[in-house]
Amino acid sequence: MTQFPLVRRPLAVAALCVSGALVAATAGTALLAQRTPNQQRAVISVVDKKGAPVATLATTDLTVREDGIAREVLKVEPATEAMEIAVLVDTSTITSGAITDLRNSIKAFAAAIWARSPDTQIALYTFGERPTLEADFSSSAVNLNRRADRLFAASGSGAYFIDAVIDAAGALKKRAGARPVIVAYVDENGPEFSNRRNDHAFDALAAARASLWTVSRQGFGSSSSTPENRERGIVIGDVTTKTGGRGSTVFDGSAVKGRFADVATQLLAQFVVTYGRPETLVPPNKLEIKLTNNDLRLAAPRWTTR
């Protein structure tokens, strides 16, 4: 019977050792990659006690947690990317006395945004009766101003605010822009006819990664007596905050222009927070950003980037 030389056995053993070393090295590389954090980002707004945007923000000025776990803040820098903004306007019967103020507010808001961010795309929706796209996303003032000047209150109509938020969020999701935003004016004294809940609005906004900013005329008396009106109130309050936007209230139309101007100022002074997240099989669900300076106020989204 043929005998194989014994000298080949050490070679085989050596080959096995090399193979094992390669497997170990590969496993080590994979483990290192698994531990290397990838970069996530969140757009935030920070104002002082007087409501004025702050000029600078350092990584030490805030903390970031996902599902309660601390994340390393890598950098904080001004948000310079162009926005995509859907402006939603209540044109139900209750707003008839404020239409002129709304027209002027929309045009002034857009002009302020474009003066600093000329590539930003702005669309105009109305939601007296069913939500309607009046002017598609564009960086030109001509069409937007023309449509704004033609706004009117629909006689005998109620509002479909929640439906309008969901529709606009869907459009922003399809566009997949870097900084999607919804800015809405709604009069809480009129009836809300949307039959969808506040969590439907939040889910749509989260899917689009869009912040919601609201200017609302405060309701009185029986304005929140129906389930639909209560759902609207939650969207104006809680959902706005959870998306990283801010809400403000007015008592008459003459104050709307100033509130829209405040929103423009804050949007133009936002920051992008970049933080690290280790690779995981299951993405986190909750984002929590906090400031270390109690004299400042923060608006930040609660969802995570998946």
Image (tube, rainbow, N blue to C red):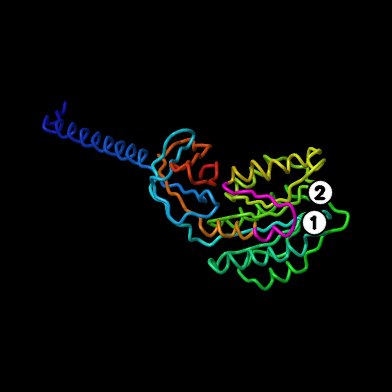
Q: Is mark 1 on a helix, strand or loop?
A: helix
190 to the left or right of 277? right
Q: Which amino acid does label 1 sit on?
A: Thr
Q: Report if residue 266 lies within the magenta region.
A: no
Local packing at callout 2 (Cα closer than 10 Å; few below 14, some 14-19, many 20+) is many
Instruction: Give the quarter of the image for residue 152.
Output: bottom right
Q: Which amino acid does label 2 sit on?
A: Gly
Work out whether 110 lies above or below 179.
below
Picture disc at residue 17? none
Proximity of marks 2 and 1: CB atoms separated by less than 8 Å: yes
User: Whole-Å distance between the Cαs marked 2 and 1?
Assistant: 8 Å
Q: Nearer the viewer, residue 15 or 126?
A: 126
Q: Which of 40 and 57 is in front in this view?
A: 57
Q: Which residue is drawn at 73% across and 43% down?
A: 232
Q: What element carries label 2?
A: loop
Q: Nearer the viewer, residue 56 or 202?
A: 56
Check disc 1 and report the residue beneath it. Answer: 95
Check disc 2 and report the residue beneath it. Answer: 190
Q: Report if residue 253 lies within the magenta region.
A: yes
177 to the left or right of 69? right
Q: Which residue is drawn at 67% across and 73% down?
A: 142
The numbered mark, 2 or 1, whose residue comes first in the sequence reads 1
Highlighted range, magenta: 244-258
